[in-house]
Amino acid sequence: MPEIVEKNFASFFEVPFCAYDPQSPYVSPLKSDLKRFLSADSNPLFADEAAFTYFTALKNRRPLGRIVVHAHTQSNALYGTNRASFGFFDCANDPEIAKALLSKAEEWARAKGHTELAGNFNLTAMQQMGVQTDHFDRRAYTDMIVNPPHIPEFLWQNGYESFFPVTTFELDLVHARIPQSAPPADHGVAPIKRKTFAIRMEEARIVLNDGFSENPMFVPLTSEEFTFQAGEMMTIIDHRLSAVLVRDGQPVGVVICIPDLNGFLKATRSRFTLMTPFHFLRYRLRRKRAVIIFYSVAKQSHGRGLMSAILAHTLIQLRSAGYEQLGITWIADENRASLRMMDKIGAKPLHRLHLFRKPLS
């Protein structure tokens, strides 16, 4: 039987490096970032330390599995649910370890009075979510969840059902079909630069909250929650790629697009070492991949072609900056408008993901 330890960050971080093949497409978050995510002192989503915990499974003293379990009070209140969520569910191809971890998460959720457990939800404001269910050999981009095929299998075996299917996309920028669209004359495009970063990112939050307000499971983000993750982008931002669309001094559209960090993280094993500056410089000189984290248009501006315009602007900027591949984070099956946009620009499905849930009797 595996040994389960609680809130041991060192072993939790090491799990994917011990459980997954080094050639796996999985890329760990930076160690310091993951530590921030799992700290009630720094993560405003979990100011109440009793609202989450995390477990590591050890076998023969090796960390071979992990899981986080948490509750999002605002989400339950907004949608009338009584759900706990799991995240960072990673483990070796060992059904005993998977069962032990899921049982531990379920036990925590029941003790808190929750009637359902669902995931992955990975503790960030701009939510990483889902469990990958196909194309396990394909390389992903920053902010995308990847996992080996035994992860969804273990969830099904332990009584979880898959729901809420979503797709991530990839676009070959050389052959992309750029929409013949530009922002209206009374709209301005404000790039997100370091000196205007705080202002532009607050505008981005406002447009995100407004444009996503009717999306399933979306919970409006506070400034603290948004800044908690978005703030880290300032060190990697390429000001040519992200922008806010402004009309009459008010933000009405936004696209957040950043260079893909996965190659850099893979090379450094997601740690700061003496070689990290060298790897970062090499990454800056060679970067050819970028990823759209999200894009949104304020509700009052829907139906005016602004999304085509702002994406056209971004694709032109990407090409001129020498980028060759673009990833687009998950789009739900029910988001027909965004799916049509992916078809319009020539983006191809990259990965299929689902949420998984289980009732807790």
Image (spheres, rainbow, N blue to C red):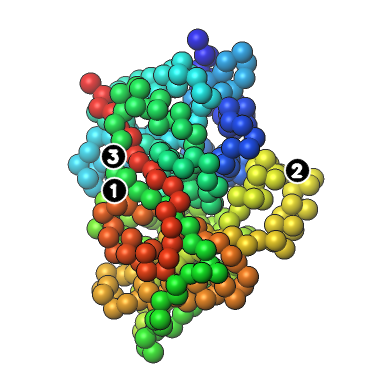
Q: In front: 32, or 320?
A: 320
Using the numbered discs, state the Cα–Cα distance from disc 1 to disc 3 in whole angstroms: 13 Å
Query: Could you tell me which secondary element the residue under label 2 belongs to?
Result: loop
Crowd band around label 1 with a 10 angstrom C-alpha radius: few (<14), some (14–19), many (20+): few
Q: Which residue is mark 1?
A: 217
Task: Tell me the quarter of the picture where residue 215 sits.
Answer: bottom left
Q: Quadrant of the C terminus?
A: top left
Q: Which residue is mark 3?
A: 163
Q: Secondary structure at mark 1?
A: loop
For the question of whether residue 85 can be seen, the reply is yes
Q: Position of residue 43 (x, y in %)?
A: 48, 44
**Distance from label 3 to label 2 (Cα)?**
41 Å
Residue 252, how many percent across, how many down?
35, 74
The residue labelled by disc 2 is 273
Sequence-wise, which precedes: disc 3 or disc 2? 3
Q: Amino acid at mark 1?
A: Met
Q: Looking at the picture, how far across and down is residue 244, in whole percent?
A: 45, 73
Which label sits in the foreground, 3 or 2?
3
Q: Tell me if residue 85 comes above or below residue 104 in the rendering.
A: below
Badge 3: residue crowd in 10 Å (few <14, some 14–19, many ≥20): few
Farthest residue in the bottom direction?
185
Residue at 64%, 47% in the rendered image: 265
